[in-house]
Image (cartoon, helix red, strand yellow):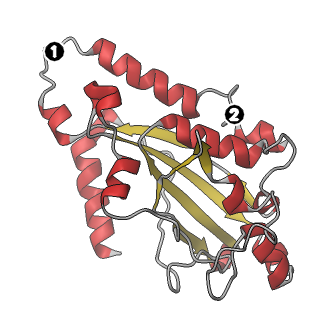
């Protein structure tokens, strides 16, 4: 916690007046990389070259090569309601066994399972992202949650994943985990590479470049009319 606090302090000092803090969440690692709902998180993360291919922009968008898109969402859990479910019901909602962290086979896994709907397949190939979620909570306030952090090569992957979860595939067959977990925030950021930043001069007319970035971010997470308008998708104006 001390190192995280110091890093955040240094970052905010460097950013100065360029940003306005909106929310501050302190996460922590929890029992064998599990979420507060009791299941291991990030099991399907790719490794090695596959992780690089999943997270970093490549030659398909040469101006931004080496950067990444980061989706962050703050979810709050109805932990009492979740814990009232049987382990078998929880496993069907998540799509994995709780203790051994083994994926349910297709014959057993419901089509509304979290790991089924969070999977994005294009032309028969699964498109991976890197998940680095952090549990957080305050016991006295009965606040229990997950700060979802995902790194993706393209914002389209994130948009499709969340559309599958919130709208459903097909529509109406939504992620049943959302009955117990409400998204309170949602933001998508483009993170440029250090090389990209070093190559931007103060007098560089880079407006076209940054306008492109803003359009991508708005399409994937900023406007309230797309598939990421989480509150309207779930009929919960408070979210």
Labels 1, 2: front one: 2
**Relative to 226, is 134 on the left or the right?**
left
Quadrant position of the N terminus in the picture: bottom left
Q: Position of residue 239 (x, y in %)?
A: 73, 46
At horizontal 81% and vertical 44% (from top left) the residue drawn is 234
Residue holding disc 2: 227
Q: Quadrant of residue 106?
A: bottom right
> Who's the residue at 83% across and 82% down the image?
88
Q: Residue at x 62, y 87 (%)?
A: 100
Q: Residue 2 occupies which quadrant of the picture?
A: bottom left
Disc 1 from disc 2: Cα separation? 35 Å
Q: Is residue 85 left or right of residue 115?
A: right
**Measured along the vertical axis of the image, is residue 232 above or below residue 92?**
above
Residue 90 vs 14, above or below: the answer is: below
Q: Position of residue 116 (x, y in %)?
A: 70, 58
Q: Which residue is mark 1?
A: 204
């Amino acid at each position: 916690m001390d190192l995280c606090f110091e890093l955040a302090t240094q970052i905010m000092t460097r950013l100065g007046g360029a940003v306005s803090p909106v929310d501050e969440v302190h996460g922590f690692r929890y029992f064998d990389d599990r979420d507060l709902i009791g299941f291991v998180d990030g099991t399907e993360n790719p490794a090695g070259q596959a992780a690089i291919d999943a997270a970093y922009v490549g030659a398909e968008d040469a101006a931004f090569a080496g950067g990444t898109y980061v989706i962050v969402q703050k979810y709050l859990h109805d932990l009492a309601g979740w814990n009232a479910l049987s382990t078998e019901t929880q496993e069907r909602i998540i799509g994995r066994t709780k203790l051994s962290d083994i994926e349910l086979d297709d014959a057993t896994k419901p089509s509304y399972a979290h790991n089924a709907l969070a999977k994005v397949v294009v032309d028969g190939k699964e498109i991976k992202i890197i998940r680095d979620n952090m549990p957080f909570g305050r016991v006295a306030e009965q606040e229990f949650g997950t700060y979802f952090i995902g790194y993706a090569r393209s914002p389209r992957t994130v948009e499709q994943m969340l559309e599958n979860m919130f709208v459903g595939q097909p529509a109406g067959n939504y992620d049943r985990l959302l009955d117990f977990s409400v998204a309170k925030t949602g933001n998508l950021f483009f993170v440029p590479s250090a090389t990209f930043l070093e190559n931007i001069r103060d007098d560089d007319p880079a407006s076209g470049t940054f306008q492109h970035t803003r359009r991508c971010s708005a399409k994937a997470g900023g406007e309230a009319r797309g598939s990421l308008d989480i509150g309207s998708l779930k009929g919960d104006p408070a979210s």
